[in-house]
Image (cartoon, rainbow, N blue to C red):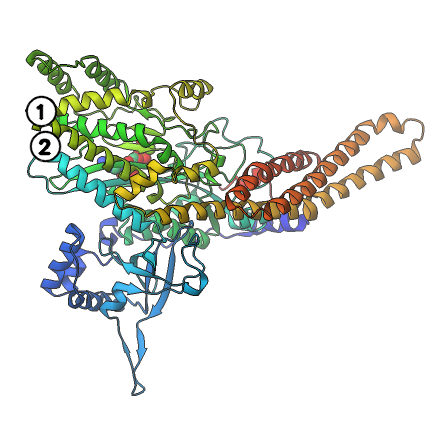
Amino acid sequence: MAILRFKALDEISKREPFQHRSTHEKISSIFGIDVFDREKMRNYIPRDAFEAMCRAIDENAQLDRKTANQIAMGMKTWAIERGATHYSHWFQPLNDSTAEKHDSFFEPTFDGGSVETFRGELLIQQEPDASSFPTGGLRNTFEARGYSAWDPSSPAFLIGKTLCIPSIFIAYTGEALDFKTPLLKSLNAVEEAAAQVAQYFDKDVKEVNVTLGWEQEYFLVDEALFLARPDLAQTGRTLMGHIAAKDQQLEDHYFGAIPSRVSEFMKDFEEQAYRLGIPLKTRHNEVAPNQFECAPMFEEANIAVDHNTLLMNVMRSVARQHKLRVLFHEKPFYGVNGSGKHCNWSLMTDTGVNLLAPGKTPRTNTQFLTFFVCAIKAANDYGSLMMASIQSESNSHRLGAHEAPPGIMSVFAGSTLSNMLDSIEERITDKKMTPDEKTDIKLDIGKIPSILLDNTDRNRTSPFAFTGNRFEFRAAGASDNCAAPLIVINTAVAETLIEFKKQVDKLIDKGVKKDEAILQVIQKYIAASKRIRFEGNGYGEEWLEEAKRRGLENVQVATDAFKVFLRPENVALFKKHNIYREAELYARCEIKHEILVKKIQIESRVLADLATNHIVPTAIKYQNVLIQNVQGLKAILPDSYEELAAEEIRTIRTVAGHVKAIREGVHEMIEQRKIFNNEENLEKRAAGYLLTVRPYLDTIRYHIDHLERIVDDELWPLPKYREMMAIS
Ligand code: ADP
Ligand code: MG
């Protein structure tokens, strides 16, 4: 038993430092080297095909078969020159992973020879044998076919010897089975709506793009220790472990020096990222020991989402080369902060203007205010849906636990803008504005400083914080696909902008001047979304009370959150903007319930095994040592042993008490699992697992963690927190 743990520790002490290959290359010389980007396309495909491809990327134009063939040829030539032997459609199914099915370029010919081929139809469409991806009842196994289709707006890239082609993944019946399909639809919806509104201010704006800059948090653990912890290895989080004497209390890890072994790992994965065109910019330690963060420069949202999922894969594999494991679980260690993924969201015009950045003139500031207020209104109207979008079994350990916001939507605007919104609202009148009133408001708006990026005016407890030139959605979990919250934010903002434009146009039709019409609707929206604005501490108890008074919902229970998507108004919203069909929403809800059940089921099984096979026998072994000691004392000191062994006897009792509680807990947990396994209704089964089975994990761990502090360290079979949290 203890052998396992000491072998792991021994393994680490023997380890040679990882040999990092020294590169003296500049980042710019390797950036995007493994990506079939525009520059390479220009060299590898005929000019008219290249131009058609650019139109497909920039304007969503369709590609014909001939062009697709030409692009496929070019892609193949480039990839084979770089040593590729296989190609694969690369997509993001509805679990936490990415999927690929590799096919060889090599094809035998009738005459016994062979050629390397890759035709346009293979580029455009593939049929992965995909019966084992989550489908939520959309396909029965007889029809277990879905197909993947090329997304030309995200460039193909090379991983090792495989050409990876970003793709969407859909069922034969047309329903999306992935994150990318609805993401692309939601991007279309909001980009179209935003472009229309932006044209009030600048006729030259033809297109708007959503920009996304994510910040990815993660933990690192030494591989030998990771493998010696079956809970970590099988569930991604520790199901037991007493918190280390020193963890994050001194807050000395944040922005501290990065340990050299970790920085070698970072340099290595960053190099891979640069080769893949992922523009990583920052890296630093996070709050908890062994916790880190990386963030790129923001990009067009579809590409940023692909880059995030791709980077997570790269990090996993580079970590292994360094004999480390990277953890994206939202709460891998009890008692220290978990990991999130902040999604920074904004809108950028094709004229290069960030619509959420204040401008220098009253006109550009009115434009800013329009988009700013519409985003707040969207959060007000669809806040529950936004919070529901990031609820999951693993993220629910974090949300509302004083390290991440609870399931209540609120918007932080910062004092300058908050005062501005209040003063505009105060000037609301029912009648037509007088010229003076209009001038006053315009003057107000003109006063918005063009730079609001003030670090002192940050609120780190707000789920949707305005940070100077973008909104930062802070509730997403580290393992989430960024598309999950983005689909909802995009759709909600699209709806709000469309409605905004309708109301403005109506006023214009009635003869109100355009600028006044815009101001009037802005005023109305500010008043209508007042309750969602909150500048205080979003983690505090008082906020829960205050939010209740304001009528804001707390989407705190994961299984309830999944069903928020099925509320009639939300089904209607997604249908209206052509994001999801009703069947897709039901399927997704089912998948989330299923994943939750499976995750808790696995955790519960792993903990039961560990408790029964590792912990209880260890505790008894130690108890026997104590018993022998007491018996020995009794044999040689019969008169005074009771006094001398009082502490031992107490400990024997304590150990027995914990062992009993663990056994009972395991027994009851298994009985509860049986009950809910027999529950036919999936929603009820999931709620049972979450609310009845999962709490046993905490009760059992409570007793195990107490035993960990009592039992002889040499006997303890599993690596401890203090060992796992000490990469140096
Ligand atoms: P902080 O920790 O203060 O939030 P970081 O530098 O870690 O700041 O992260 C900021 C993130 O916001 C980066 O990913 C950055 O690219 C992104 N960002 C900045 N401007 C925009 C924008 N206009 N649209 C989307 N994301 C943006
Ligand atoms: Mg941030």
- Label 1: element kind: helix
The residue drawn where x is 13% and y is 54% is 55
Residue 658 visible: yes
Which quarter of the rendered image does ligand 1 occupy?
Answer: top left
Give residue 23's mark: none
As drawn, 649 above or below 442: below
Q: Which class describes the residues within 10 Å of circle 1: few (<14), some (14-19), or many (20+)?
A: some
Q: Quadrant of residue 552?
A: top left
Query: Ligand 1 closer than 8 Å to the CB at disc 1?
Result: no
Which residue does the numbered mark 2 point to in the structure image? 200
Q: Quadrant of residue 212?
A: top left
The residue drawn where x is 13% and y is 16% is 441
Which residue does the numbered mark 1 point to in the structure image? 515
Q: Which class describes the residues within 10 Å of circle 2: few (<14), some (14-19), or many (20+)?
A: some
As drawn, 553 above or below 441: below
Q: Residue 222 at what x, y percent from top left?
A: 51, 47
Q: Residue 79 at what x, y percent from top left?
A: 26, 65
Q: Residue 645 at what x, y percent from top left?
A: 84, 29
As drawn, 80 above or below 281: below
Seen from the viewer's position, the closer of residues 573 and 15 is: 573
Seen from the viewer's position, the closer of residues 633 and 35 is: 35
Residue 718 visible: no
What's the CA distance linking mark 1 and mark 2?
9 Å
For the residue marked with disc 1, what is the amino acid?
Asp
**In the visual, does 405 lie left or right of 661?**
left
Seen from the viewer's position, the closer of residues 508 and 211 is: 508
Query: Ligand 1 closer than 8 Å to the CB at disc 2?
Result: no
Q: Are marks 1 and 2 in contact (CB under 8 Å)?
A: no
The residue drawn where x is 14% and y is 63% is 43
- Label 2: element kind: loop
